[in-house]
Image (cartoon, helix red, strand yellow):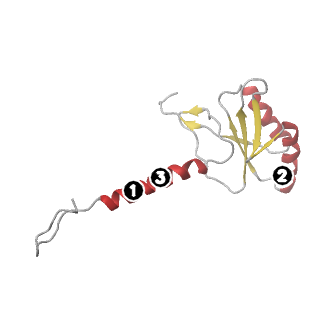
Amino acid sequence: MGMSPVKKGKINAEINVTPLVDVVLVLLIIFMVITPMLQKGRPVQLPTTHNPAALPEDENELLISVAYTGEGNPVSVWLETKEVAVADLETLLLETYQRNPNKRITLKGDKRLQFGQVKDVMMVVNKAGFSGVGIVAEKSGVPGV
């Protein structure tokens, strides 16, 4: 395209798209690398809902992830990016509540877990003094499901 010979005195009206394609491919690679890093906390398979409420991200938010690990002891609890035992979670949350009682708790529970396993973590949050827990869900692709 851009390499076609041009007669002397003629204007080349062809567009050279090679630099455009190069830039677009570099941007695509950058977005593919950065996007997984934007997820906070431990990656889990989230439950789906038709119309989840969207809450803005907040600096005053504490993220707790309840992840499925498999057979035996299928639950691991993560406070932000650090794995903690459930007994230690209560102590850490009590300390956090004493420092900042207005902190908002967000819970990511893996959909492969039974509700009771996630509820146990919610009870620990409640014992620490936090009045409400936000639960993260993904928007389902099928309406009404």
Residue 10, quarter of picture: bottom left
On residue 29, the disc is 3
Between discs 2 and 3, the one toward the N terminus: 3
Q: CA distance from mark 1 to mark 3?
A: 9 Å
According to the picture, the residue beneath numbered tag 2 turns out to be 96
Q: Is residue 117 above or below residue 4?
A: above
Q: Where does residue 63 sit, x and y in percent of width and height? A: 72, 46
Where disc 3 sits, the SS reads: helix
On residue 24, the disc is 1
Residue type marked 3: Ile
Q: Is residue 64 above or below residue 144?
A: below
Residue type marked 2: Thr
Between discs 1 and 3, the one toward the N terminus: 1
Residue type marked 1: Val
Q: Where does residue 27 sit, x and y in percent of width and height? A: 45, 56
- Circles 2 and 1, Cβ within 8 Å, touching? The answer is no
Residue 9, quarter of picture: bottom left
Q: Residues within 10 Å of mark 3 (few under 14, many from 20)?
A: few
Residue at the image position 85 percent from the left and 56 percent from the top: 99
Q: CA distance from mark 2 to mark 1?
A: 45 Å
Q: Is residue 3 left or right of residue 44?
A: left
Q: Is residue 99 left or right of residue 145?
A: right
On residue 140, the disc is none
